[in-house]
Amino acid sequence: MVRETPYTRLCETKKILTVNGQYPGPTIHVHKGETIVVDVYNMGNYNITLHWHGVKQPRFPWSDGPEYITQCPIQPGSNFSQKVIFSTEEGTLWWHAHSDWSRATVHGAIIVYPKHGTGYPFPLPFEEVLIQLGEWWKKDVMEVITEALATGGDPNISDAFTINGQPGDLYPCSKPGTFKLNVVQGATYLLRIINAAMSDILFLSVANHSLTIVGTGASYTKPSTTNYITISPGQTIDALLLADQLPDRYYIAARAYASSVNVSFDNTTTTAVVQYYGQYYPLQPPSLPYLPSYNDTFAYFNFSRSLRSLASESHPIDVPLNVTTKLISTVSVNTIPCADNSCDGPNGTRLSASMNNISFVTPSIDILQAYYSNISGVFGDQFPHLPPFIFNFTADYQPLILVVPNRGTEVLVLDYESTVELVLQGTSLVAGIEHPMHLHGYSFYVVGSGFGNYDTDKDPLTYNLVDPPLQDTIAVPKNGWTTIRFRANNPGVWFMHCHFERHASWGMEMVLIVKNGRDSNTTLLPPPPDMPPC
């Protein structure tokens, strides 16, 4: 049940939108390959939809959740039963609202256990622990984005980061609620880490302890030991923590990675405490961990590049080697002129964002219904396969004529079973910055990434086609590029967008339509009878 609930943080009480009164929301536990039905009752004051992030929903986008893409919103006082179909996913995922900025507080974890009778490809941990990273605003978050969209400026930054809904010891009025992980010396803990923050890539570390990465995006990885992790909004990471230190209290800490000098960010640190069982005199305060500097691009990029799929006999991978559809899309922050320079963006403009110079315009009828029922006039099918303008995408200075995007609702149509390579090219227009891009309905192999302009001749030679990580969200480096590959074997309408919520609000979004295959088992399933009306 979605409803408003009073919560106290940072010395102040306010009402926030929650599910079942919980922040973060309830955790969903399933086994690989299961199907569940979630009954969503909207008792709040805003339209709402729920998205099952990283769940592929084979042939059934009707329950995927993005507002006006695969459904119209669940209006206040209404309900919708969402069938969630799990297939190949195994590990940690999450669910969240997909309407405006309501996901700031409407989110929770999904744990997909191995099929009954099978186990993890690593030793069974002593305990499993959720670490959900988020952001907190003192102000009503819906008012924050409404004001920003009205004025054309950047939304106000958050007042705190959170771990499991709590800011931690370093914020006022927060110490009593700080999340504590009680551990037994010598035991191993599986941390299921989720970045539910709205607009920040985060560094996270545990004082005096290392982490062994074993999964990301509900897909297993080769074990990799590190002193810190980098996790983008939308991403999940499974990591093993061995409690191998002297009994004491140690901080888990997380703070923002922010590479752009032109973009303000929340420069605070959230903490939780690893607390050993036993009798001892604890250090006061607990030890703080090493975290990379807020602008350490080397640390951010190296962690992301270190991930490798497990690619074992029991967990094989299927990297497309022969590509039938090659795409390149720019991902850019833009501006739109305002009359009399009256907006709050740079030089009186309105901030915008785009993919291949198209700033996405959300329709008033959902695209899936329009596609399924052949309703004309809702979307076009001319999303470009290449950038419409070729220029030095990452130059220090860009001509002003390039910063203004087109606006439209264009989709990209793919044939069923086509093998797709998509190069996401960051640009320095307005503000060069990372872009964590999420694709609904699919996981994809991240086969390459780098800085500068993508070179069609040289850069493919650097691809990892042996054991690239399988993910559903990947951050394109600032003024750089990332290449993903996937097999278009899930028919339907699928959303792709930046998971920096402000960039999505400005239009850094696009839609894929994957055509039906040749038989009933490769065809889009019909809609459920209780789809919310537009």
Image: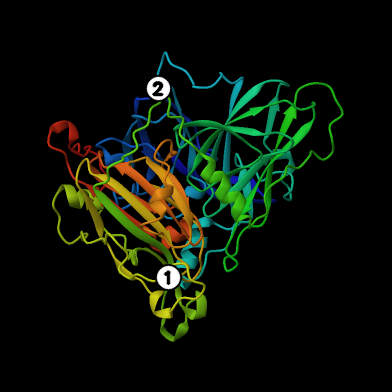
Residue at label 1? 392
What is the distance, in whole Å, between disc 1 and disc 2 at their CAs? 44 Å
| Vertical arrangement, residue 77 with respect to residue 93, above or below | below
The residue at the far top in this view is: 117
* Amino acid on which the number 2 mark rests in the picture: Glu
| Vertical arrangement, residue 504 with respect to residue 527, above or below | below
* Label at residue 210: none
| Vertical arrangement, residue 301 with respect to residue 506, above or below | above
Counting from the top left corner in percent of width and height, residue 236 is at 50, 39
Residue at label 2? 313
Identify the residue at image location x=28%, y=35%.
Answer: 58
Circles 1 and 2 in contact, beta carbons < 8 Å: no
Nearer-N-terminus badge (1/2)? 2
Q: How many marks?
A: 2
Counting from the top left corner in percent of width and height, residue 174 is at 71, 45
State the quadrant of the N terminus.
Answer: top left
Counting from the top left corner in percent of width and height, residue 482 is at 43, 52
**Residue 532 can be seen in this image:** no
Secondary structure type for disc 1: loop
Query: Between residues 314 and 471, which one lies in front from this camera angle?
Result: 314
Counting from the top left corner in percent of width and height, residue 503 is at 45, 60
Q: Residues within 10 Å of mark 2 (few under 14, many from 20)?
A: few
Query: Between residues 165 and 110, which one lies in front from this camera angle?
Result: 110
* Amino acid on which the number 1 mark rests in the picture: Asn
Q: Quadrant of residue 56?
A: top left
Secondary structure type for disc 2: loop
Query: Between residues 442 and 345, which one lies in front from this camera angle?
Result: 442
